[in-house]
Image (tube, rainbow, N blue to C red):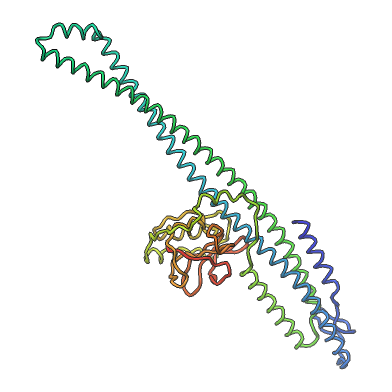
């Protein structure tokens, strides 16, 4: 990726070196105007205009290369946003596995305690029977009975003691079996946790690689833009009209480049294991609404206060945010707990038709509009077709339109 960036910069240099450095046969001063005080002839003006047209064509070709590089840079930012959300997904799965392991271990500990208590009770029973003389005592009791009724009562007592002994033995066996089953569950839960942790590591490593490549692209792009600025300055016309046209063209190009960055597409397959998505059901969950209008206003107020803060993947404030980190913290201010993962946020919330959006709802964007588990971005709707979002690396929390081709759906937290 770094070699490709250097190649793009080299192409840009080669292209701009082809641009004429003068616009007429006369010498140009630092301002770009002729130092010759004589009035240029009609032919000289025509020649200057022809050179200016040729220069603009070269600049347009170079501008196309810059736009292509910019699009790649934005796509790389979208890739990084997806890697960030997969990192959040792995953390989400890791937390679930840890909770499951803790619960299983707690149950196994309780079962083991029950086993010890049961064994203690059985030992005490056997010790008491031994101290009372066992079968000899039973025989002497029967021989000394005062009539049939006393003998019957004493025999019933002995039967009851035998039943309790059998019950204690059954409890020992059941407690031991329960402890073994729960211990197996704890081991399985721990294996799941280790798998989730490995996926976290893979996602984080991939995201870091994407970040390094993006920084390399940004450096190459900045170099090309500086070179373009220098060469365009050399094309300044002697005519006020041509100078105004050049300024208008550059302003239009800058506006088009900015619009292209804000609406760039997604970045494609990351090569990161998708197994972490299996923790979510295949069918879209119905979800539920936990917040209210007061909470929505508080969530929006919180999000507005973060505008201008940088995007950083996997961040949830107070100084930096990623997309789901911003919506999570915003709705936490509104009294609703959300997971730090856009897919899980969509699964948890009440599904809302896009035609019924109201401020405070969450809007989601996906790479596959038929699969909610491909969601990779979320924003907080504020009304008027706009949202507050933490967009991608290199950009800050901002207000943006929700009118994008990747708009998937909305929920009410």
| Residue 254 occupies quadrant | bottom right
Considering depth in this image, is 129 or 4 the residue closer to the camera? 129
Vertical relation: 285 (above or below) 112: below
Quadrant in which the C terminus appears: bottom left
Vertical relation: 320 (above or below) 17: above
Please state if 297 lies on the left or on the right of 8 as rendered: left
| Residue 12 occupies quadrant | bottom right
Residue 256 horizontal/vertical position (percent) = 67, 75
Residue 94 horizontal/vertical position (percent) = 52, 45
| Residue 403 occupies quadrant | bottom right
Q: Residue at x 45, y 55 (%)?
A: 338
What is the residue that sits farthest to the right in this orientation? Answer: 25
Please state if 147 lies on the left or on the right of 211 as rendered: left
The answer to whether any part of residue 320 appears in the image is no
Q: Residue at x 9, y 10 (%)?
A: 147
Residue 227 horizontal/vertical position (percent) = 78, 69
Residue 284 horizontal/vertical position (percent) = 48, 58
């Amino acid at each position: 990726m770094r070699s490709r960036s250097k190649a793009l910069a080299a192409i840009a240099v080669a292209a701009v070196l082809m641009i004429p450095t003068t616009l007429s046969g006369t010498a140009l001063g630092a301002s770009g105007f002729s130092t010759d005080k004589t009035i240029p002839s009609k032919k000289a003006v025509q020649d200057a205009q022809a050179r200016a047209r040729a220069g603009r064509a070269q600049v347009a070709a170079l501008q196309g290369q810059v736009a292509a590089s910019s699009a790649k840079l934005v796509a790389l930012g979208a890739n990084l946003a997806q890697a960030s959300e997969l990192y959040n997904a792995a953390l989400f799965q890791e937390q679930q596995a840890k909770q499951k392991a803790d619960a299983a271990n707690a149950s196994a500990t309780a079962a083991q305690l029950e086993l010890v208590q049961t064994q203690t009770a059985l030992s005490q029973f056997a010790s008491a029977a031994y101290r009372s003389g066992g079968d000899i005592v039973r025989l002497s009791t029967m021989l000394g009975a005062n009539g049939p009724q006393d003998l019957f009562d004493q025999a019933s007592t002995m039967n009851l003691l035998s039943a309790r002994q059998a019950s204690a033995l059954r409890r020992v066996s059941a407690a031991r079996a329960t402890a073994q089953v729960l211990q197996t569950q704890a081991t399985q839960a721990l294996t799941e946790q280790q798998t989730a942790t490995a996926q976290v590591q893979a996602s984080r490593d991939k995201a870091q690689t994407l970040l390094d490549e993006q920084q390399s692209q940004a450096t190459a792009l900045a170099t090309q833009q500086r070179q373009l600025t220098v060469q365009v300055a050399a094309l300044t016309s002697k005519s006020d009209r041509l100078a105004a046209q050049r300024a208008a063209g550059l302003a239009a190009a800058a506006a088009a480049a900015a619009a292209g960055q804000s609406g760039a597409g997604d970045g494609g397959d990351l090569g990161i294991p998708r197994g972490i998505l299996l923790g979510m059901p295949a069918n879209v969950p119905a979800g539920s609404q936990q917040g209210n209008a007061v909470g929505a206003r508080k969530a929006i107020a919180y999000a507005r206060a973060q505008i201008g803060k940088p995007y950083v993947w996997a961040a949830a404030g107070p100084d930096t945010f990623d997309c789901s980190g911003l919506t999570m913290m915003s709705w936490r201010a509104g009294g609703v707990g959300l997971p730090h993962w856009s897919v899980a946020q969509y699964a948890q919330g009440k599904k809302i038709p896009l035609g019924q959006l109201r401020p405070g709802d969450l809007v989601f964007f996906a790479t596959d509009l038929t699969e909610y588990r491909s969601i990779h971005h979320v924003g907080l709707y504020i009304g008027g077709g706009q949202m507050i979002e933490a967009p991608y690396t290199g950009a800050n929390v901002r207000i943006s339109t929700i009118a994008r081709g990747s708009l998937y759906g909305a929920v009410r937290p």
